[in-house]
Amino acid sequence: MKVLTKYKLFENLNSPIGIEEYLEKIGILASKKPQIIKWWNDNRSNIKIHYFAFSSPAPIAGVFLSEDDIAVNSKIQMPPHIKLFLSLHESRHCDHYAGGDFMSGYYDTVVAGNKPAFLEAYVKFEKDANDFAINSMIECGFSEEMSRESQMLRRNESAGEMVYKMMTDDIKKFRSSNFIDLLKKQIL
């Protein structure tokens, strides 16, 4: 049965949904959709969205899976605009990955056991992804929410120690060969 479950999750991973369907699934208000869809099509049209229940017991809300793929966990309960924020945040990690320095700063430092280098890279990448997502949310019509919630949304910037430990444990557990392999094994 576990193999069948993994197969179904893999099928979901290979079946991206468009921004319109994603906004519907996460429950964004109809009045907000046109502005978000236009912004997404103008700025993130290359990003494919995968929305399904991750099998991980860890509270992983979203991940990037390539230069143009993100996955969002449908079983994590959060307000619709926070799921949109998460999608934008993960899409920025796609840019980081495409830029080439994400692997060396984020994954390779954990493999090498270089915690100080990881923590430095972690804060840099998470802050940039949060800045991008907050600014994008404002452009999409969520100024009020971002002024009210931006500090809460930035809490992940101080989670480097926890992430380092989780990645260290999961790299050993899953015998991952690279960061994308690790992320897929964590969520599938």
Image (cartoon, grey):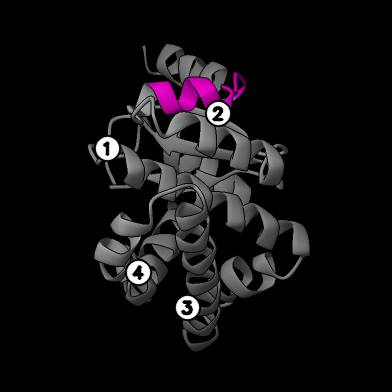
Residue type at tag 4: Arg
Mark 1 lies on residue: 76
Q: Residue at x 52, y 38 (%)?
A: 36
Q: Tell me which label, 2 or 3, sits earlier in the chain.
A: 2
User: Start and end of the magenta stretch?
Assistant: 14-24
Residue 17 against residue 106 in the figure, above or below: above
Mark 4 lies on residue: 154
Q: Residue at x 52, y 37 (%)?
A: 35
Mark 2 lies on residue: 19
Determine the secondary structure under disc 1.
loop
Residue type at tag 3: Val
Mark nearest the camera among 4 and 3 is 4
Q: Residue at x 51, y 16 (%)?
A: 7
Q: Marks 3/1: CA distance?
A: 24 Å
Q: Tell me which label, 1 or 4, sits earlier in the chain.
A: 1
Determine the secondary structure under disc 4.
loop
Q: Marks 2/1: CA distance?
A: 19 Å
